Image: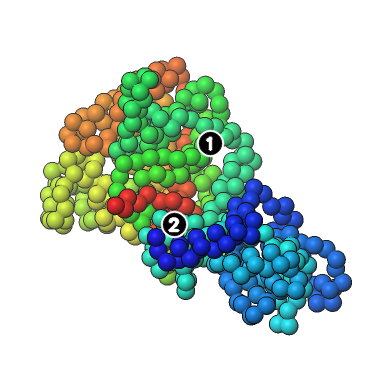
Amino acid sequence: MDEHFKIRKEKLEKLHELGLEAWPYAYDRTHTFTQVIEAYADADADALEAMDDEFRLAGRVVAVRRMGKSVFAHLFDGETRIQVYLRRDKLPETDFEVVRLLDLGDIVGVAGRLFRTRTGELTLLVTRLTLLAKAFHPLPEKWHGLQDKELRYRRRYLDLVVNENSRRIFRMRSEILREIRMFFYREGYREVETPMMHPIPGGASARPFVTHHNALDMDLYLRVAPELYLKRLLVGGMEKVFEMNRNFRNEGISMRHNPEFTMLEFYQLYNDYEANMALTEKLMSLLCERFLAGGVLRWREQEIPIKPPFPRRRYMDLVMEKTGLSAEEVWDQTKLARFLGRELPDQELPPTWSKMLELAFDTWVEPGLTGPVFVVDFPRAISPLAKVSRRDPRETERFELFIAAMEIANGFSELNDPFDQRERFEAQLREREQGDDEAQWLDEEFLAALEHGMAPATGEGIGIDRLVMLLTGAESIREVILFPQLRTRS
């Protein structure tokens, strides 16, 4: 038991001796701190003096200044701070005994009236004090946020108490999600929920997490994407649907990757990828106008205007441009492998042409995609769920939106030919046999749905965490996820 814990435990015993409860069941609060500050920000000392209103507030003690028989303290209620003034001659004797036992981090309820100090600070003169929760560990001292980033993520509850920027980010995240939902409601979309546990992990090229259902005695997979279930709803005639929920991918952790993340996916019948690119421009413009000053993204040292229409660049053109390879070389596995072996001698080469191509794109193209830019017409081999391009049968009608060198959105004209889809799944199985453990599986139930007929459609996924990073200025995905995945400490 550390010294702080021991001392605070002794104070708890003294509270019990006074007959007080350290953890009461409720407190009848009349206002939040924000409500008080907004309502009386302009009230002068005389106006406050003339008021008889009693205010009942509650918050955590985050600062204390003791002056003999009186105490100034700052309380924090999760959003903002307010000052309170506690005087022995204004409080019942037992309440002032509680004041003497208070520690930083304790949560209290205070009742009293408002006044202004000589320095003009809006303050509550406390006439009753109620301890609502005793804290047994001190708040960190001299934090400007937390210096240890990993500790901030492990103990987000402390980070939110002391770090205004963290509170700003998560307030904004909530508002961004609300704005997105309202956008799709206005566009006539219906919000739906699809399973989190799948018998076959489909809808994206990724390694899944596996679990076991005891009653059914079968393995299930945490979903890597909701796509194949959402397209079943299109088969059923639901014309416009969206879902915003968690995906799980058993992959590495980085500044842009967390194994559990939030994805928005939306689908509409009777349209192709052109319609979704237009819808994406509309959504991004709205969010940037709402959350960015002047609609300009300030990312590190760059200023990126988010103004449609966004430019479009073909995938293979970009690869050839940035690598210097010819069309013949980039489409040929042997020649592409030779190039990668020469340019990336320390890199273990992927087992398939499609993975080699993605490595080339990730290495030479993606870092320069400041954006916003739509990369369009991805090769068929890396797009197993997208419809074949009307311009080149080797390609598909697929796009990805890049902003600040990050993939933000991925969409395409949906493949609705069940025979072509079966061939694509079978090609994916062959890639899996060649060593690509992220290749997609063959899903007979999804194929059966397509065989019943799915009208022309377009769909898209947007990574919510990365989008929030852009809109809040956070440089790591861990800054925008309340509880990011971390290695367990022994």
Of 336 and 188, nearer the camera is: 188
Of 198 and 463, nearer the camera is: 198
Q: Could you classify mark 2 by the number of other residues whose Cα lies within 10 Å: few (under 14), some (14-19), or many (20 or more)?
A: some
Q: Which residue is mark 1?
A: 242
Inter-mark Cα distance, 2 to 1: 33 Å
- Type of amino acid at the residue the image marks with label 1: Phe
Residue at left offset 61%, top offset 70%? 100
Residue 162, given in percent of the width and then of the height, sits at: 51, 65
Of 143 and 333, nearer the camera is: 143
Q: Could you classify mark 1 by the number of other residues whose Cα lies within 10 Å: few (under 14), some (14-19), or many (20 or more)?
A: many
479 lies left or right of 202? right
Residue 240, given in percent of the width and then of the height, sits at: 56, 32
- Type of amino acid at the residue the image marks with label 2: Arg
Residue 345, given in percent of the width and then of the height, sits at: 12, 56
Residue at left offset 59%, top offset 73%? 64
Q: Which residue is mark 2?
A: 155
Point out the frontmost of discs 2 and 1: 2
Residue contact between numbered discs 2 and 1, judged by CB atoms under 8 Å: no
* Residue 373 visible: no
